[in-house]
Image (cartoon, helix red, strand yellow):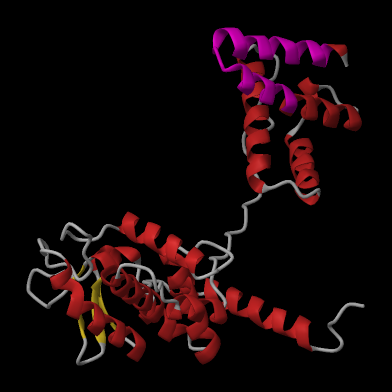
Amino acid sequence: MEADAGLVERYLEHVRVEKRLAARTVELYALDLQKLTENAAKAGVPLLQVQNAHIRRWVAQMHGGGRSGRGIALILSGWRGFYAWLGRESLVQANPVQDVRAPKAPKPLPKALSVDDAVQLAEFSAEEADPWMEARDAAIVELLYGCGLRVGELVGLDAQASREARGWVDLEAGEAHVLGKGSKRRTVPVGRKAIEALRHWLKVRTPGVAAKDPALFLGRHGQRLSAQAIWQRLKQRSLQAGLATPVHPHMLRHSFASHVLQSSGDLRAVQELLGHANIGTTQVYTRLDFQHLAKAYDAAHPRAKRK
């Protein structure tokens, strides 16, 4: 297979000198082509005679060996570039990698808190914190977890309803009116704990700062709190509350959806509450719900426990 080694060296020289790729990129190409050469040697076929079926078989072997779809895609990209160069050199008539794609990586499940952790965060009170910021942050947590709002929907809320308001909370009716994705409006119920937290926050909101914005949630300078600021405050609060993992706003939205589904089993209701246009987006929470059930089964069923 000396001829194969020579082809690889010529190609690496080409990308190093003519394409001026970084040294680390050339090293990665070399590793990918080493794997290609090893596969071809095991199959008893020269690199110039590798066919589409060979590539597909090797992809299946990598996937079966546990390599991720992203990792396989990167390898295929290196192989595809090599055979494209061989084609330009008139050494092969067709690129055997051209129509081969890596297996799709499964979509990661959204991270959700356990019910206990969510309640621990919601009930946490930073005793030594500034009372003004404590009231605001507590109300933010209650709304995110209690209503399943997106962080953009939360920051868009105004303290009072108006024609210009993107969203607002009607405390008497126990409803939040929000502007979601695609400029679609929806109304979601607001629970008792969230209403209590909001009433307390509204009492101290204006006395705490000179409000320069009609926003429900303000920063220290009287302007609408940004999504980034909420991310930072929530991360800090979750760590202070003793949670093992830093919490972000979307994690509370996922927790809301997962916990409502676990209790009600009503996927359509969860879809409406979250403002999903397609129920397929909401169905990911059935997987989270199954994981919850599977863990409960493994922990409780006498025939499921491992010795």
Q: Main secondary structure of the magenta part?
A: helix
Residue 105, relative to residue 203: is it above or below? Answer: above
Rendering quarter of residue 138? bottom left
Q: Based on the picture, tell me whether residue 269 belongs to the magenta stretch.
A: no
Image point (41%, 86%), residue name? 269
State the count of labels. Answer: 0
Residue 135 x, y percent position in the rendering: 29, 75
Q: Quadrant of the N terminus?
A: top right
Give percent across and percent down for residue 105.
Answer: 62, 53
Q: Residue furthest top?
A: 17
Whether residue 100 is visible here, answered yes or no, is no
- Which quadrant is the C terminus positioned in? bottom right
Report whether 236 appears left or right of 63: left
Quadrant of the image occupied by residue 164:
bottom left
Residue 257 image offset from top left, x and y in percent? 47, 78
Q: Is residue 68 visible to the viewer in this orientation of the structure?
A: yes
As drawn, which residue projects farthest toward the left? 163
Q: Nearer the viewer, residue 306 or 218?
A: 218
Of residues 94 and 246, which is closer to you in this image? 246
Quadrant assignment, res 75:
top right
| 10 magenta-colored | yes
Q: Which residues are magenta?
A: 3-31
What residue is at 63 percent from the left and 36 percent from the top?
74
Q: Residue at x 33, y 71 (%)?
A: 134
Q: Position of residue 253 (x, y in %)?
A: 43, 72
**Residue at 50% in and 91% down:** 264
